[in-house]
Amino acid sequence: MMSVDVNTGAAFSAGVPRELFKAAGGPNLVNGYVVRNDGQQFLMPGRDSQAETWPITVVLNWWAELE
């Protein structure tokens, strides 16, 4: 992810790009990233090194538990 200072006055000019941080990429990166409305944070998908060991719990007939 890169950042660059810009001047939008009478004449447009752009500064030298600089790296903000390394972002994950690859075939599993679907939408890239989302910027928070105030522009202060990014939401980016990532990989958890332990994700393959997490159990999956399937709850059948969960609707009946609400009654």
Image (cartoon, grey):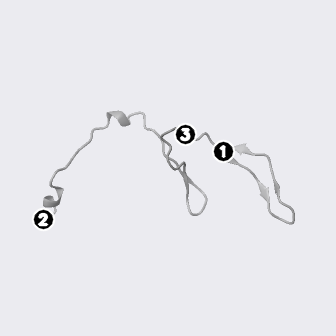
In which quarter of the view is residue 55 placed?
A: top left
Q: Residue at x 56, y 63 (%)?
A: 37
Q: Amino acid at mark 1?
A: Leu
Judging by the rendered image, the residue that carries numbered circle 2 is 67
- SS category of the residue bearing label 2: loop
- Residue 24 is labelled as 3
Disc 1 versus disc 3: distance between alpha carbons?
13 Å
**x then y, percent, for residue 36:** 55, 59
Q: Residue at x 12, y 65 (%)?
A: 67
Vertical relation: 65 (above or below) 4: below
Among the two numbered marks 3 and 2 on one chain, the one whose residue lies closer to the N terminus: 3
**x then y, percent, for residue 44:** 52, 48
Nearer mark to the viewer, of 1 and 3 = 3
Vertical relation: 9 (above or below) 60: below
Disc 1 versus disc 2: distance between alpha carbons?
51 Å
Label 1 crowd bin: few (<14), some (14–19), many (20+), radius 10 Å: few
Disc 3 versus disc 2: distance between alpha carbons?
44 Å
Q: Residue at x 53, y 37 (%)?
A: 26
- Residue 39 is labelled as none
**x then y, percent, for residue 12:** 83, 60
Label 2 crowd bin: few (<14), some (14–19), many (20+), radius 10 Å: few
- SS category of the residue bearing label 3: loop
Q: Are marks 3 and 2 in contact (CB under 8 Å)?
A: no
Nearer mark to the viewer, of 3 and 2 = 3
Q: Amino acid at mark 2?
A: Glu
Q: Amino acid at mark 3?
A: Ala
Q: Residue at x 21, y 46 (%)?
A: 58
Judging by the rendered image, the residue that carries numbered circle 1 is 20
- SS category of the residue bearing label 1: loop
Locate residue 16 relative to residue 64 in the image: left or right: right
Vertical relation: 44 (above or below) 52: below
Among the two numbered marks 1 and 2 on one chain, the one whose residue lies closer to the N terminus: 1
